[in-house]
Image (cartoon, coloured by chain):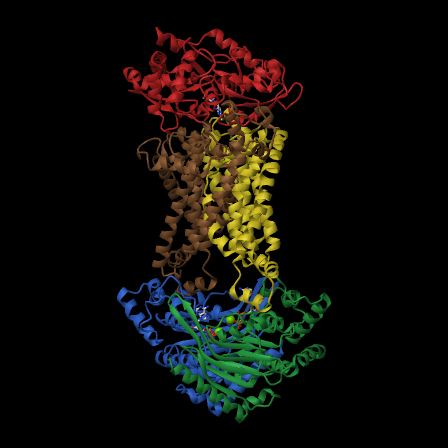
Chain colours: A red, B yellow, C green, D blue, E brown
Amino acid sequence: ADEVKLQLKWVTQAQFAGYYVALDQGFYEAEDLDVTILPGGPDIAPTQVIAGGGADVTVEWMPAALAAREKGLPLVNIAQPYKSSGMMLTCWKDTGIAAPEDLANRTLGVWFFGNEFPFMSWMSQLGISTEGKGEKGVEVLKQGFNVDPLLQRQADCISTMTYNEYWQVIDAGVAPDELITFKYEDQGVATLEDGLYVLEENLNDPAFVDKMQRFVRASMKGWKWAEENPDDAAEIVLDNDASGAQTEEHQKRMMSEVAKLTAGSNGALSEADYQRTVKTLLDGGSSPVITKEPEGAWTHVITDAALN
Amino acid sequence: MMMVSMALLVWCGGWWLNGRLANSPASNTSAVKLLVPAIFGVTLLIVWELLVRGLEVSLVILPAPSVIAARFATSLPILWQDFQQTILKGALSGYIIGCGAALLMAIAVDRSDFLRRGLLPVGNFVAALPIVGTAPILVMWFGFDWQSKAAVVVVMVFFPVLVNTVAGLRETSAMQRDLMQTYAASYWQSFFKLRLPAALPFVFNGLKISTTLALVGAIVAEFFGSPTVGMGFRISTSVGQLALDMVWAEILVAALAGSAFYGMMALIEKTLTFWHPSQRG
Amino acid sequence: MNMETTTQALNSQAAASDITPQAPVIEARNLDLTFQTNDGPVHALKDVSLEINKGDFVSFIGPSGCGKTTFLRCIAALEQPTGGALTVNGMTPDEARRQRAYGYVFQAAGLYPWRTIAKNIKLPLEIMGYSKAEQATRVEQVLELVELAGFGGKYPWQLSGGMQQRASIARALAFDADILLMDEPFGALDEIVRDHLNEQLLKLWARTDKTIGFVTHSIPEAVYLSTKIVVMSPRPGRIHDVIDSPLPKERPLDIRDSAEFIEIAHRVRDGLRAGHADD
Amino acid sequence: MNMETTTQALNSQAAASDITPQAPVIEARNLDLTFQTNDGPVHALKDVSLEINKGDFVSFIGPSGCGKTTFLRCIAALEQPTGGALTVNGMTPDEARRQRAYGYVFQAAGLYPWRTIAKNIKLPLEIMGYSKAEQATRVEQVLELVELAGFGGKYPWQLSGGMQQRASIARALAFDADILLMDEPFGALDEIVRDHLNEQLLKLWARTDKTIGFVTHSIPEAVYLSTKIVVMSPRPGRIHDVIDSPLPKERPLDIRDSAEFIEIAHRVRDGLRAGHADD
Amino acid sequence: MKTVLAVLSVLAAIAVIWYAACVPMNIKGVLDAAERSGAEVVPATARERRDMGSFGLVATNSFAIRDVWSQDRPRLPAPHQVAVELWETTVEKKITSKRSLIYHGQVTLSATLLGFVIGTGLGILLAVGIVHSRVMDMSVMPWAIVSQTIPIIALAPMIIVVLYSIGVQGILPKAVISAYLSFFPVVVGMVKGLRSPDQMQLDLLKTYNASLGQGFWKLRLPASMPYLFASLKIGIAASLVGAIVGELPTGAVAGLGARLLAGSYYGQTVQIWSALFAAAILAAALVALLGVIERLVLKRMGVQA
Ligand SMILES: Nc1ncnc2c1ncn2[C@@H]1O[C@H](COP(=O)(O)OP(=O)(O)OP(=O)(O)O)[C@@H](O)[C@H]1O
Ligand SMILES: Nc1ncnc2c1ncn2[C@@H]1O[C@H](COP(=O)(O)OP(=O)(O)OP(=O)(O)O)[C@@H](O)[C@H]1O
Ligand SMILES: Cc1ncc(C[n+]2csc(CCO)c2C)c(N)n1
Ligand SMILES: [Mg+2]
Ligand SMILES: [Mg+2]
């Protein structure tokens, strides 16, 4: 069997259910693949791992991947299981925030580590500076791993994913109507998340391409299986979580939310979505994520072969 | 391959040169004492540069020293801001508060045998709490700005200083204490005239260990939440952006600041405990 | 060496404290001291009775471990006897200590390495609250007395062992203690220096009427200096013999060649040997 | 100071020694040693010339800091002279050291605390590669010699200071060194024990015909033990007088009351005093 | 005995302070929950409460105090909450369970021990080199100090990636990080220890014409033992911290570090605290174990207690 090492962007959770399902249900095996899934974490830059040769393919957000490309690390998107973005900003309603314009002069929690790009683009579209509080500025905090800054009211808003952190806020006893959320999708600044990326040079190797075709085919099969059997998929994820930290309730709910994001995709990258992401990123204001239109940052070679 | 063998050559050359210097008659002059480690460091840097170039190591894995130096030179304003936030505000204030509190506590502990017996084992236990666990808690308690970093530093430096000071205050010989007895000296007289001076070498041991702990503590704490400035913030953000040259520039700042901080304490130690055999050479 | 000023100061003190001529300054009755150690109890002093009068110069001599140091420490309230009675100037040793009645010279110099010689000698003066001017003059005086004038600014480790020991003697002489307790103060010195310091000590004693307790291993030294020689023997530590010296207070160095001297020395040696034989 | 007698004595002595009748075992010519210290150079030895013959027992006496230890260390190649010539058995001191010609007894016992007394004595034997059986018998022998039989299994801190010092002497005697160098070995002992060890040392010396260099501060000890007494004086360290002892090899303890003894002692004392006056 | 009593009373005092501290620390969370469940809270809204002092809130809402010790996600969990969690995750869980702290502790422990062995070995080797070679002493020592001013958490991911890229995965990368933290105290302690023999002891061997090796084995090494153990105790604690730090960027899959992180990620303060205590207990146990070994070794060497 051919070995494939997959680097995830984050810890083992239903966000990556498709891959775990494919592994668990033997879809990879059926394609004659021996797949190792490497969980990520707060300190892992998947781009760096793949650059170092620690993985063959990685799950990454497109802004980070394009930024890496500009830094001289030629990553190529070979598949895009996630159709839409799950990112949003979650705020306390009682702070008086009702619309994006009200964000000025607030304290906002943002993820960094390469995940800050969509937020920066959005703020620059709103014409809000991120350099500090003011009429047209916000104070940005580097948000840690959890939703405490919101719960402790150290920040008025924090970044959340529809499938994860938002529900942690709810689980902490907050009623949904105490909150107001701004989805990046709704604000027109959505960027593509959780695509599959490989190193460009590897695509010159037919054996590698073949391996990736089989990998993507099996993975997409896993995703579709997960969408249809969310509860079973969540169980599979739980079985694979070595930290023992995930709870069944949380993973099942995450799976059902994730299914909404993956539903629209058959695995092939939509060119329109790509263009929208690039445009958002180029609009990044004073310090844009990428400075010029990337070239060759994606390919349909794999999905075309895999999905037909 | 050329560069790799050149690296090997430079390495051997550096050692040879240092060997000559260290065993020369001039080896006790302060110039040589500075020169030898400097040559070692430079050798290390050249070897690093040659290996990275020779083996064509990717920039996003390990940048060459020249690249780091260039980044350092062009990013001075940012580095200075980060230095202020992390070292001057976070590490330094935490260091002063932590060491000060530890010194006061040590005096209290030293006065009461009961406290010493009870507190030191508990103290050693608390000191073993890993910072990666305490940092998120302290960030939750003290907020995102430098106050929480200072709190982490306080927790980190408190026990080394306490333990060393308590040990130092007990370091006097029986004869030295008996002498004070025959003078019927009061507690504070014998404290200031005997126990404190005798404890100084130990106190400085703790203070020196704590310099590096303070630095590392303040930086690490920023990984768990920070404003958008600071060395820890910059490092974690830059890793995510694959700006490894920036990461290493910050590490360089940390190493420079840490060495300077340590060297400063060592210098103060030297002037205050010049009488101690370890300082007399 | 000009000691007149010191002498005056010291004399006036001595006269003032001359209250009860009859009562002994130090009186031990059936003193007992047992140390509890890991290897079981050590009987360091057993049934020790001794009277020391004002102005006495008492030497203690005996094999290693016979309790000489322990007895001196009891007098200075550095050790608590486990039995018997001990009074100093009619008080308990601890009360006497609080009144700063003692100058103690330890076997090793025990100077504080972070203080210069002068500041080491100043130490007791600072603690006892002497005025700055008084401190300075006294330091000058005693430095001269032990022939260390000019070395006040040096640190202890810059001096030889003998000079350190002299500094520690100076430290004990700097303040006005009635009772001087000296635990083998000249052990580390060579014979010439030792002779010299012996002479100085005798002069000082003659001038000031201090009461001195003195531990030594040297028989000639004990005989030369003392009005009373206490020979001790070990296991358990006890007094073997107390020899009152008939030698006059005025003692030139060559008194050591006199028949009287040699006789006393012989008696001490016999006592010592007997003590050793007990082993 | 009379160098003629010395030379004569040396010659007659040399004639008596068996192997190389003409050559002295240790020969120093105009030896010089200056230490470079932070406070400037210290002239520890100046122009020191001395010959020691096989079987000599040479004592070095002099005020603190006159270079006694330094001279012994030069002989043992522990210190490098800065001028002059020094030969041991016709070789350089370092060559002699490599041939393991020395047994050195330091001023403090310096036993390794992690080794029992027996294993401490074994240390040089292990290093010099003696067989296990040989090691065991030698340890037994020397333990008996210094009267420590039965204490081989104890650790140093379980013994008194005197016993430790004896163990360290045993350690130096355990292997076959021609030359025994002893730096104030009995300084810390009381007079009775010291007398006893002096007797033992003399007996051993008589039996083995070793050459011994011995540093002491005690005039009677130097006179009692030596065939030759070297009086040194300090700043710079140099030889003040060399006194050949006319005492016989057989020396009971009470030889110390003889007129001859007292006369030599006087001469040594005078030399010492003169050395001090140089200060 | 006296020590036990003293420790117990200090612990009791800490517990009292701790319980008391829970009141101001947790009052806001309790009041938020109370407000949601319809209770009358003064002031009534979370917005207003945000800007108020904790003690003021305690004063105006004394009814809520008893809840501060039983919250789900407290800012400061009460001691019994931590104890219960510790108990449940150690004693009441199967050792093989992923929720068992013993399972995670053992994962961390193996990396700690491996790192400790590597770090100690390296430290001793360096110290031996430094003591015997002037060049090493002059050139390496300053840089060893500098190495400790580098924040390991910044280096850790890079170390992992570099090791990944040369094919090293699993326990070794973690061990390398923990070795990095533990070698320094060992170097410092051992250099001190190997240099602890005084001039006389060294001269003695010189008069025997002992070789360098004999000097090392018979004098320097035995003399350094007390120093070695003192630094080993510091080293093993540092090793444990290293292993935990190393667990974060290795995907935090298992181990006490993963536990800490997961607790932090989901705001499970009780879980963080119990993992923290588990780590400290593990460190204390390792140090105590070294203490026992030390006593045995030194006793065999005859060194006085
Ligand atoms: N603090 C102590 N604890 C236990 N035993 C002690 C203590 N101090 C002294 N001893 C023991 O008491 C006995 C008497 O000791 P002391 O020091 O008085 O003897 P010494 O006559 O002064 O001997 P030396 O001439 O060696 O100084 C010895 O056996 C000694 O070991
Ligand atoms: N390693 C050294 N460095 C500098 N000076 C030294 C050193 N060793 C000895 N000296 C100096 O050399 C002189 C002679 O010292 P040495 O130890 O030989 O004297 P000594 O006669 O043995 O004295 P003591 O009777 O006190 O042992 C002294 O002034 C001493 O301070
Ligand atoms: C330090 C840190 N960096 C990034 C993220 C963001 N992130 C990366 S993957 C992912 C999906 C999981 O819900 C999220 C939120 C984070 N949380 N913490
Ligand atoms: Mg004594
Ligand atoms: Mg000497």
x%, y% of residue C200?
A: 62, 80
Q: Is residue A150 left or right of residue A51?
A: right
Residue D265 versus residue A146 in the image, above or below: below
Q: Is residue C203 left or right of residue A261?
A: right
Tally of numbered discs: 0
Quarter of the picture containing the C terminus of chain B is: bottom right
x%, y% of residue A48?
A: 46, 25
Judge whether residue A231 can be spotted in this image: yes
Residue C145 versus residue B132 in the image, above or below: below
x%, y% of residue A305?
A: 36, 8
Residue at 59% in and 37% down = B90
Judge whether residue C62 can be spotted in this image: no
Residue at 46% in and 69% down = D108
Quarter of the picture containing the N terminus of chain B is: top left
x%, y% of residue D212?
A: 42, 76
Residue at 54% in and 56% down = B111
Q: Nearer the viewer, residue D209 or C268?
A: C268
**Outermost residue toward the bottom in this view:** C259
Residue D225, picture quadrant: bottom left
Q: Nearer the viewer, residue B133 or A81?
A: B133
Indicate the quadrant of ligand 1 in the picture.
bottom left
Q: Nearer the viewer, residue C234 or D6?
A: C234
Q: Nearer the viewer, residue A292 or E229?
A: E229
